[in-house]
């Protein structure tokens, strides 16, 4: 391992970053994949997602991200709405042409909640075409963090899209903690569908040492900066 870590500032994650880099490159060239980052809290999933978004932007992909949230479980498609909203709000109505029009109620806050918004087949089909229309403009990375807490409608769309992703220039990347969330079979269903499952290992003792050394350095740097600010204030009489 490089004791300095990699350019993303993560230690002992070169393998994961390289696998994600290859998946991004494949998506950029038109072959979409669904990848799942699986592991317990604190293992470094969100940090890898952050690094992947940066890599995607460097490669010219649009990076969109959202996370599952226990408190939004009752709102159908809330996470999908959060995920796609920045792209949808920036584009004209033409991304809703053809079958994508069936996805419009998901983004229409005045639409009736419940049945019409969650009309399973048509809306899933519409959302798929919406993603296809958006990706036609620029390849995309779609990131769903804490996927064990997706509202059920967003969870269905994630699986629906994952099964059809290969012909789109899209890397769909989710992170989840196995055994957590309302549905014990939720994460196993995701990993059974994924083209690639990455399970980051716990850091070695050496890697953990590098991280805590780095944190110590940051803390002493912050303390030094605070002392300097205080000294400047006291000499300037403020
Ligand atoms: N490989 C790594 N190198 C350096 N710091 C890391 C690494 N993995 C995780 N961390 C740090 O550990 C903490 C928890 O990581 P996080 O990505 O939030 O984990 P998770 O999303 O799996 O709960 C964060 O402060 C993060 O910066
Ligand atoms: Mg996390």
Image: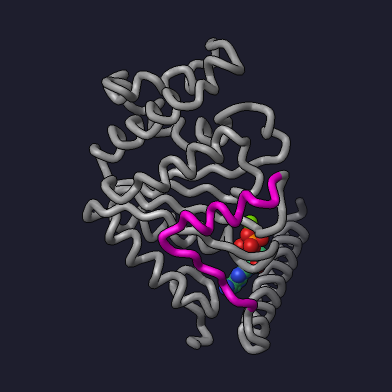
Q: Can you say whether 163 is above or below 19 in the image?
A: above
Number of disc labels: 0
Q: Is residue 186 magenta?
A: yes
Asked where in the image residue 154 lies, by quadrant, the reply is top right
> In the figure, 192 relative to 143: above or below?
below
Residue 206 at what x, y percent from top left?
63, 89
- Towards the viewer: 25 or 237: 25
In the rendered structure, which segment of residues is drawn in magenta? 183-202
Q: Residue 105, position in %: x, y?
A: 47, 17
The answer to whether 183 appears left or right of 162 in the picture is: right
Residue drawn at x 54%, y 77% is 11
Q: Is residue 153 shown in magenta? A: no
* Residue occupying image coordinates x 36% and y 28%: 90
**Residue 112, quarter of the rendered image:** top right
Q: Position of residue 38 (x, y in %)?
A: 58, 63
- Residue shown at 61% from the left, 36% from the top: 152
* 3 up-or-down from 49: above or below: below
Find ligand 1 in the image and state its quadrant: bottom right
Q: Give x and y (percent) for residue 144.
A: 52, 47
Q: Relative to the observer, which residue lies in front, 195 or 110?
A: 195
Looking at the image, residue 34 lies above or below residue 102: below
């Amino acid at each position: 391992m490089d004791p300095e870590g990699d350019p993303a500032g993560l230690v002992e994650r070169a393998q994961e970053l390289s696998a994600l880099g290859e998946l991004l490159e494949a998506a950029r060239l038109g072959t979409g994949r669904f990848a799942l980052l699986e592991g317990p809290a604190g293992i470094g999933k969100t940090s890898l997602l952050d690094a992947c978004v940066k890599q995607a932007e460097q490669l010219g992909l649009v990076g969109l991200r959202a996370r599952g949230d226990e408190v939004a479980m009752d709102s159908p498609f809330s996470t999908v709405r959060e995920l796609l909203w920045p792209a949808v709000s920036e584009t004209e109505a033409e991304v809703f042409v053809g079958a994508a029009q069936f996805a419009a109620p998901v983004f229409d806050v005045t639409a009736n909640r419940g049945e019409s918004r969650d009309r399973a087949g048509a809306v899933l089909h519409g959302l798929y075409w919406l993603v296809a229309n958006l990706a036609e403009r620029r390849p995309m990375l779609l990131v769903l963090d804490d996927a064990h807490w997706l509202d059920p409608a967003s969870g269905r769309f994630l699986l629906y899209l994952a099964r059809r992703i290969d012909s789109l220039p899209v890397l769909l990347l989710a992170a989840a903690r196995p055994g957590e969330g309302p549905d014990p079979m939720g994460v196993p269903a995701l990993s059974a569908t994924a083209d690639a499952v990455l399970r980051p290992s716990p850091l070695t003792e050496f890697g953990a040492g590098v991280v805590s050394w780095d944190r110590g350095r940051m803390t002493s740097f912050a303390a030094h900066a605070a002392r300097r600010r205080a000294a400047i204030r006291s000499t300037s009489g403020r």
